[in-house]
Image (cartoon, rainbow, N blue to C red):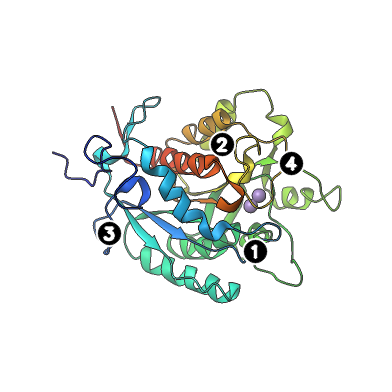
Amino acid sequence: MSDFNQPISGNDLARFSGPNTFMRLPVANALSGLDAALVGVPLDIGASWRSGTRFGPKQIRAESAMIRPYNMATGAAPFDSLQVSDIGDLAINTFSLSDSIRIISGSYDEILTNDVIPLAMGGDHSITLPILRSMARKHGPLALVHVDAHADVNDEMFGERETHGTVFRRAYEEGLILADKTYQIGLRGTGYGADDFAEAQGWGFQQFPAHELWHSSVTRMAEEIRRDIGDRPTYVSYDIDSLDPAFAPGTGTPEIGGLTTPQALELIRGLKGAQIVGCDLVEVSPPYDPSGNTALTGANLLYELLCVLPGVAQR
Ligand code: MN
Ligand code: MN
């Protein structure tokens, strides 16, 4: 028998029963000994259009119940070599975004006193700034793979400097990320000005607009990004709206013409070998996701991220 936590098998307990944890993994109340931890951040008060991502963690967990431990395409066997648990939800303050941001950062500081890789289930994208603040305190400035329809580099929104649309400008200003090792993939949609994305390019961000990726594999692009990152500590921030709304309609700010599900898989699988120190999957909004497909896709992308973490066994 394995020494590592295992998801409950669908052959031992019907998939529609059991705990609502990620992949029905055990809940951990202590962080010591964990290699990777799923953590919910149920927040939607940083979003500018549709709300509902406060229900994201619960629904991602529900849809994750069908995922089995072995990755049949890549051979990855994360539960053969990593101790993984679901550590529950952060106790955000749903009446205050600024307080929630402090809570997230404080919680991450505590999580990161252990040698554990956190995988956050959002929540809108505003959760990523406090996470990056903590990650950078531990690891220094990070390489960043940011998959999103939006660059999220606004200066402010209604005078607010910490929202889901301002994250990566703040991260750049605060020196949390390595500007020339920041990759924004899937950008598209309409803008307020023709140069909305250009300023961030000037900082050094490398941008891969969705329309340049249409109809083709992104495997080579992902491998080139991985090579360019080298062995720098790397954070992956995955906004589900990077996918086309045909595949992931349940999200706050959908944009047509996005990535396909196979491209999303190619992208994550191509990062294998990077020194990933943390990830998030944000912007799943269950009220706009009547089929559950968006949460299902989000859950599977988190599993794929788990499969490319350092130290994962291959079978
Ligand atoms: Mn975003
Ligand atoms: Mn987005």
Q: Earlier in the sequence, mark 4 or mark 2?
A: 4
The residue that appears at 68% across and 59% down in the rendered structure is 165
Q: Amino acid at mark 1?
A: Arg
Decide if ligand 1 comes within 8 Å of the CB at mark 2. no
The circle drawn on residue 188 is 4
Q: Judge left or right: residue 292 versus residue 10.
A: right
Q: CA distance from mark 4 to mark 1?
A: 21 Å
Q: Judge left or right: residue 155 versus residue 248.
A: right
Q: Badges 3 and 2: C-beta atoms under 8 Å apart?
A: no
The circle drawn on residue 47 is none
Between residue 255 and residue 11, name the one nearer to us: 11
Residue bearing mark 2: 225
Q: Badges 3 and 1: C-beta atoms under 8 Å apart?
A: no
Q: Amino acid at mark 2?
A: Ile
The circle drawn on residue 28 is 3
Q: Earlier in the sequence, mark 3 or mark 4?
A: 3
Q: Nearer the viewer, mark 3 or mark 2?
A: 3
Secondary structure at numbered mark 3: loop
Secondary structure at numbered mark 2: helix
Q: Residues within 10 Å of mark 3 (few under 14, many from 20)?
A: some
User: Where in the figure is residue 142, as x and y percent of width and height?
Assistant: 52, 54
The circle drawn on residue 170 is 1
Residue 274 visible to an observer of this rendering? no
Q: Quadrant of residue 81?
A: top left
Task: Give the answer, above or below, for where 299 lies relative to 177.
Answer: above
Q: CA distance from mark 3 to mark 4?
A: 39 Å
